[in-house]
Structure formats: structure tokens, C-alpha cells
Amino acid sequence: MKTFIEKLETRVAITDSLLCVGLDPHPQDLPEDTAQAAQDFSLRLIEACADVASAFKPNIAFFERYGAEGWIALKKVIQSIPKDIPVILDAKRGDIASSAQAYASAAFDALLVDAITANPYLGSDALQPFYENPAHGVFVLCKTSNPAAREIQDLQVLGHSGQPAPLYQKVALLAQSWNNNNNIGLVVGATYPQDLKRIRELVPSMWLLIPGVGAQGGDLESALHNGLREDGSGVLINVSRSISRSAHPRQTAQALAEQIRSIRQQFRSISIAKSPSPIASSALQDLADQLFDSGCVKFGQFTLKSGLISPIYIDLRRLISYPRLLNQAAAAYLPLLSHCTFHRLAALPYAALPIAAAISLLGDYPWIYPRREVKEYGTKAEIEGEFHPGETVVLIDDLATTGGSKFEALDKLSSVGLKVKDVVVLIDRQSGAAEALAEKGIQLHGVFTLNQLIDYWESNAKISPEMAESVRQFIRHTTTG
């Protein structure tokens, strides 16, 4: 069975559309105020828009108001939607865990929808029933499109940097941390374009469901330019009344889909123009070439520690066999370290130990490292090297994936009175480490992102476009390395 995101992305690829059609049978739009009229209204929209819709989003409220007859009508509407089109139930559920389990069963087992909208106010245990199965998706309310959204969603809380930040930003980062099955998205209104932009910066890979375009006053072009991921995807533009109240719903839906397509193309062109060479420095380009040529990066099929099958494997332990390359890699850390304030380096065993030693020699930085296993003899030290409680250290590692190994080291360093504000790595795999560390007030710095390297190697014909796209899809579809 496909995961929810796989089903969604397959549909998006087939239609080349990011249009989500909302099924909202408002009573004033019906010839009579009955469940049958609401059903007929929705069936006409589905028939009109099925070939251009990337998803349909029925609003449960407009069916529940008719009681049992409305529920039956809703089920018939959902059953009429072609099986390859994702169905997102607009229900905005939010209750304690046992009630949430019942709501999830109603949506996924009784109504057979693919995803649901939910309220995060009760926390992760109330949302878990909706996202525990990768075949199902949940879009968490983050910054809604209604005028009074700011009353609660903009309240100041302690943010990931330790400074006050709006509550909606905290919600975005929490949702990212829950997204282990890669089936959680966010609801972000087009009516708040700057907030939408900030959310995309915080969660660069998550899917966003964007209501508010059209009848609520949100601007389509602004929503796309602020919400699209770097790959020109990752958003669903939900439109309801602008289509249903049109004299020609099919033509309106087709025109919207084409407009979205055109803006996406413009977005891609602007992105390319902004960064004609993502790895601009000749020294970094040479380093990228050497990492490839030395076999530190391999392509194929590899089983990772997590059990996932990856098309790429990065083995920076091989650096010790290439002294000049090790020196090059260490030198690439120095510009990033120059922007950090610290007393000494702290390296993670084992791959980062030779890298830290080389950095230490180049930059004249003292360094330490937390042991994986505490010695049972001698000093029984947990931390090797000289340090003083209260000092700030910068964590050095080879890769960043989810951040898990970093947190183990952080706990050991913290237990002896050392502070960490920055982590510096050679390659950021873009699998959630930056966001996880940011939640703890720690900034991740990477010499390269994996996407930068893939783009560079593809542009220099070191890997095929097919292999490059395979790795990009793996980056998008996983949050664990």
C-alpha cells in the first residue's frame, strides 16, 4: 500500500496540478436545504474537476448539519471520488487520545478518506491516532486563514532559539518533530503571506495545505511564491467557493490549475536565476569533486541503520586514507567556525575525531571528545581532553541526519557543565537535524547540504539525472537517515 504522501505526490505528478478542490455545500448555494442537495452539489463538482484536481477536500460540517442523512451523503460523495485522487476530510478534529482514536477510525475506517485536518491544541497524543499509519495523513492547523487567527496563533511563547516567538511557529516545529512517518502537513492560510513565508523557512520539506485563496482574499501568486518548496512543489492550494459559485466550474478549475502551473514555472526560473552555481567557491567545488572521486559518497541501494533503503551512502570515515582530502575538508570548516563563539571543539566519535584533529591543527583550536563508553579503569573519564565547566564548545561531526547522535553527545557535555550553541558538519543530509537542534536553541552549520552536492554532481555529469532525482525524492520522503 502506498503511503499518503506517495499517493499525493503521484497524483500531483500525473496532473501537474497543485489544486485541491474544496467540497463545501453552503446552504445558500443549494436549490433546497437537504442532504440530497448537498450530495448532488458535491458530485457535480467532482465530475467537473476530477481531471485537474490533485485532491478533494470535503468539509464535514456541511454534511453533519443534516444528521444521519448527511453522513450517508458524505460517504457517497467520498466513494464517488476516483481512487487515485487523495481525499482530505476537513474536520479539524482535536480531542483527548481515546476520542481522537475514535475520530481517526471514523475518518479512515468508516469514511475511507486518505487524510484529515486536525487541531494541535491538545498535543501530540491527541494527534498520534491520525498519523501513526503512514497510509493516512494529517494536516495540522498552524496559521489559519480567518481574521481572528492572530488572537491565539500569534501569542508569544518561548521559541526554538530561546527567544519569544509566535505560537504558530512553535506548532510548525513541533509538527516537524512528530513527522517520523512523513505524513504530517500544515494548514497555513494564504491570507497571511509573511507568516506563510516564515513557516516555509522553518519547515522546508513539509506539505502545506493553503486555504484562503479567492473568496477569503488570499493572493494565489503570493501564496505560491511564499509556500512552495525549493523543488517547486509541497503545497496544495485549496479553492472552494471561487469554483463552486462560478458560472462554469470546470473552466474555472482548469484556469486555476493552469495559473498555478504558470506561477510554479516562474518560481523555478527565479530559483535557478538566484543561484546559478549553488557551490560557487572553486575550493568547495574541488572538495565536492574529491569526495565523489575518493568513494566517500556512493550510489546504489544501501540499507541504513534505520532499516531504510537509500540510493546514496556517505562514508566520511574514508577521509583518513586521503590526507590531502582530510586537510581540505578540515579547512572548509574554518569559515563556519569563525562565526561561532566557543572555547574549544567537541568531536563526536568516531568519524569526526580525525576531522576535529585536522581542524585543531589548522585553526589552533583545543578540542575534546565525549566517549561512547565510559572507561572502567584509570580516570574513568566520560570526556577526554582538558576543559572547564561553564565553557562553551562547538560540536564537530561529519554528517547531520536526524540529530539523534548529537543529542546523546549534548547530554554528556551538559552533564559536566559545558554549553553548546552550535553544531558544524561537513554534510547536512536535510533529514530534520536542523529543525530538531533549533528546537533546543542550537544552530546547525553545514559546509554542504546534500541537495547542493547532488545538484553539483548532476551538473558535472558525475551522476545521471535519474540518480539525482532518486536521491532528491529520498530526501523529500524521509526524515530519518
Image: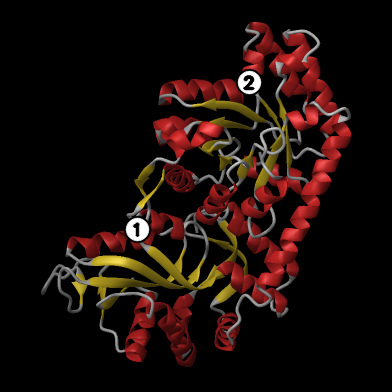
Q: Residues within 10 Å of mark 2 (few under 14, many from 20)?
A: some
- Is residue 290 positioned above or below 213 on the image? below
Whether 305 is drawn above or below 356: the answer is: above
- Rendered residue at 74%/46% (across/down): 12
Q: Quadrant of the N terminus?
A: top right
Give the alpha-carbon distance from disc 2 to disc 1, as whole Å.
39 Å
> Which residue is labeled 2 in the image?
60
Depth order, front residue of 187/125:
187
Dot 2 lies on which element? loop
Q: Is residue 217 left or right of residue 337?
A: right
Confirm whether residue 16 shows in the render.
no
Nearest the camera: 417 or 470?
Answer: 417
Q: Amino acid at mark 1?
A: Gly
Residue at image position (40%, 57%) is 438
Residue 161, quarter of the rendered image:
bottom left
Q: Position of residue 311 (x, y in %)?
A: 62, 63
List x then y, in percent, for residue 392.
Answer: 24, 71
